[in-house]
Amino acid sequence: MSNFSGQIRASSSLMRRLRQRLSDPARLLQVRFFTTTEGSRPTIVHKRSLDILHDPWFNKGTAFSMTERDRLDLRGLLPPNVMSTEQQIERFMADLKRLEQQARDGPSDPYALAKWRILNRLHDRNETMYYKVLIANIKEYAPIVYTPTVGLVCQNYGGLFRRPRGMYFSAADRGEMMSMVYNWPAEQVDMIVVTDGSRILGLGDLGVQGIGIAIGKLDLYVAAAGINPQRVLPVMIDVGTNNEKLLKDPLYLGLQQHRLDGDEYITVIDEFMEAVFSRWPHVIVQFEDFQSKWAFKLLQRYRNTYRMFNDDVQGTAGVAIAGLLGAVRAQGRSMIDFPKQKIVVAGAGSAGIGVLNAARKTMARMLGDTETAFDSARSQFWVVDAKGLITEERQNIDPEAQPFARKVKEVNRQGLGEGASLVEVVREVKPDVLLGLSAVGGLFSKEVLEAMKSSTSTRPAIFAMSNPTKNAECTAEEAFSIVGENIIFASGSPFKDVDLGNGHIGHCNQGNNMYLFPGIGLGTLLSGSRIVSDGMLQAAAECLAAYMTEEEVLKGVIYPSISSIRDITKEVAAAVVKEAIEEDLAEGYRDMDARELGRLSQEEIVEYVENNMWIPEYPTLVYKDH
């Protein structure tokens, strides 16, 4: 009887709580609109004992509670002291600090690699803890798991490989990919980053070792965007390599044959795309570090049928646009003045052309989005590649660069001609912005930077955007010391701020793709958009450009601190969701259908995004036999 009355009391208190929630309209909104915070549900596991400790997805190490140790047959397999996550992190950081002291006087590259190794070992043991450490120290560790150290990791990946992470599809797997995708254990995959290793950063063809870049990018998807780490998949498509050193290396892990080309190459990528979208219809695929000749072709081939984008073409472009708009604001002008900027671009590869196309579209939009506006925006750019200034006289011009070839009459009036050198172009054009996407370290020589002093801008901008650090067109120190302290400086890899004396600081802005791609991916996922449209990419770039306060941009700070990356990503994702709704592309996600999405206010969209970001907290594990 007493048990029955206890049940009545419990159910009446439940009814009371429900009535309270229903009488509060704000709470009602939450009940109706938002799913459970990502990652906070109990997790059903089908393994126990040592199997759990050897599984990085579920392992908590010394943080398993005594109840869980009993439930999962772990009692006696761990030291008896139950540690909090804070204590675990403290132990891990102490280990890292010991390394720091021992390596203080050593060369910096092996030190960065040693740090990567220690972090990677943690990743192999305990995913939740790894992401907790990464998020808490994102400013310090982003350069270790991503640029510039990831370049070093890819170059040495053969020796660093310990346990597989991600999937490898090779030319030898043709005809098998549809069944291969079922070898991956996750029933749901939200995000794939895929590379063919043909142009890793500015390091060239690294073949199968390029998987390091896909792993690094997905670490940032988890840390910055809160994509659940159990639903990400790094992929390497190995179609061979043209790197002679790797072809002769007996320890190389990939196919030792020259790269496939033409239709044979396309067939492999087609089969891969069909296979992954067949198993995971809602997955988003980010293409990463494909050489220019394929980057554009594959983007055009798939972008209207699959949820995919190319980070080098579209992500780099978005970050550059945000920086260019920030540079206009730093001159004390409105972003709407962007179409008046004269821009010299050094580099006409996939990143350079991607930025040019996006900048031209942005200018055209500001000028009324007409055919005439699009045409007139073209005249704001001067493109210089390895052969010099590109004009209409250029033989065998790359079709992607063709729209930006200068008219011969125009350049002759300026005293320039086909193939004019970068220094000549800068001297004659006197640009507002010098933008480097060439992958040629030191390209902005003393002469080129001297020529920038004659810029007609009140505050010229120098963007040395090539990665990794050794490929930067110039350093922050060179730019400030030669051109003067009244410049805006941005780079792709991190540089330290420059002390200009008299208490003045030359701010070095890192125009890193990590400001945008996690938000683009998360926003696409949560909107359920069928494709990643130009408008969604534009909304992401404009959101990033507007993120900085007036006070910050006037000091020359045009990109935010990486330490606030989760907040930036949340705002960028919300802007992408909003644009997808406006373009009628949104189809909803999980319990939120397209109609409900369309009814959300700006604040509710941000809240919806935040509630769907995974947080690295140990879930309660519940064992269930198969």
Image (cartoon, helix red, strand yellow):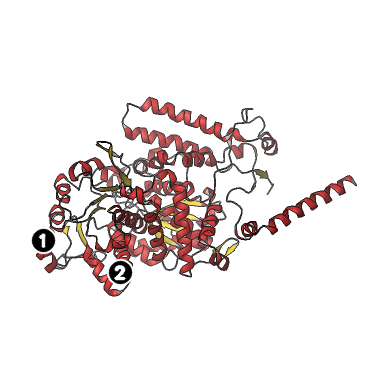
| Residue 611 left/right relative to 534 | right
What label sits on residue 288 in the rendered view?
none
Q: Which residue is drawn at 44% across and 53% down?
A: 518
Image height check: is 503 above or below 319? above
Image height check: is 74 above or below 225? above
Q: Which residue is drawn at 21% across and 55% down?
A: 457
For marks 2 and 1 on the same chain, the one whose residue lies earlier in the sequence: 2
Distance Cα–Cα, label 2 vs label 1: 28 Å
Residue topped by disc 1: 416
Q: What residue type is labelled 2?
A: Leu
Q: Which amino acid does label 1 sit on?
A: Leu
Q: Nearer the viewer, residue 57 or 456?
A: 456
Between tags 2 and 1, which lies in front?
2
| Residue 459 left/right relative to 231 | left
Residue neighbourhood size for the residue with mark 1, other residues' Cα within 10 Å, grouped as few (<14), some (14–19), many (≥20): some
Image height check: is 323 above or below 107? below
Q: Residue 389 location, x and y as percent?
A: 16, 59
Q: Residue 74 location, x and y as percent?
A: 65, 34
Q: Residue 519 location, x and y as percent?
A: 45, 55
Q: Residue at x 60, y 60 (%)?
A: 33
Q: Residue 56 location, x and y as percent?
A: 55, 41
> Residue 325 lies in what quarter of the image?
bottom left
Q: Residue lying farthest bottom?
A: 371
Q: Residue at x 33, y 50 (%)?
A: 553
> Residue 252 lies in what quarter of the image?
top left
Q: Is residue 189 something one can see in this rendering? A: no
Element class at badge 2:
loop
Residue topped by disc 2: 367
